[in-house]
Image (cartoon, grey):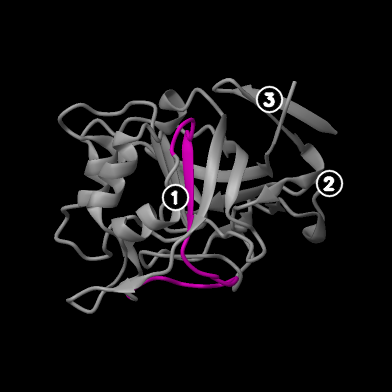
Amino acid sequence: MKFTIEHCGDAYESDFAQGIDLSSVLGLPGKELKAWWADDVDISPVVNGDWIGSVEKGAPVNFFNIKFNPHGNGSHTETYGHISKEKESVHNYLKKYHFVSWVVSLAPEKAKNGDSIITLEALKKSLTKWHGIEALIIKTGDYKDGHDFSGSNATYFEPELLAFIRDRGVEHVLVDLPSVDREEDEGKLLAHHAFWNYPEDPRDGCTISELLQVPSQTKDGLYLLNLQVASFANDASPCRPVIYPLTKVGF
């Protein structure tokens, strides 16, 4: 099924059959992307006396509980409630679900302190036209099923990079890392604060998505993003970003 959209005076077309899923799987031990020392996702049948909610155990249906941490288990989307006392819910603040987006691959660089970072300069060299870009998807590596970032001091972003894309009107940033900030940064979370402009003037409708799993064959360029987020009343929730390559056309 093909579709056409108009954005900022230009027309683009794509095909819903060409969707690329950027989310990591939950509930498959050994295949989940993890961080922050989170336990594996636990999916287990409800037990009520002698009754076990599993067809395998004799029940007529499968009736399972799921226990996980949205920040540490798999792809998730968060609002500035992640860093505020009010813990604003992503369910209340994400009210639009389709965005013209750009996928950009940025290679980590070694900082003076030995850390692996993504720099603003690298972004500026890779992407020069920002008009109409609502969401930025940043691919930094090829992280396989089962990758656990816990305790690895994973690659992170210069806060200046997040401030830069904020000032260019980008509303949503999606990354394949556990955080835009350093794993241990004394609680500063400078990149989070910069992107959300918090606490000075919080950007209510803007989100950060982390722990994506971007397929290696995904090319840099323009896409339509469908950001699917589970309706949890929480600062973060599991997400399934799906992108569709856009081609510019004339009316």
- Does residue 138 belong to the magenta stretch? yes
- Residue furthest out toward the front: 250
For residue 60, the mark is: 2
Identify the element where label 3 is drawn: strand
For residue 127, the mark is: 1
Q: Which residue is mark 3?
A: 5
Q: Which residues are magenta?
A: 130-151
For residue 115, the mark is: none
> Vertically, is 237 above or below 200?
below
Identify the element where label 2 is drawn: loop
The residue lying toward the viewer, choosing from 178 and 225, is 225
What residue is at 24 percent from the left and 30 percent from the top? 86
Give the distance between the C-alpha atoms of the residues marked 3 and 1, in whole angstroms. Answer: 23 Å
> Vertically, is 46 above or below 31?
above
> Vertically, is 114 above or below 134?
below
Q: Is residue 185 visible?
A: yes
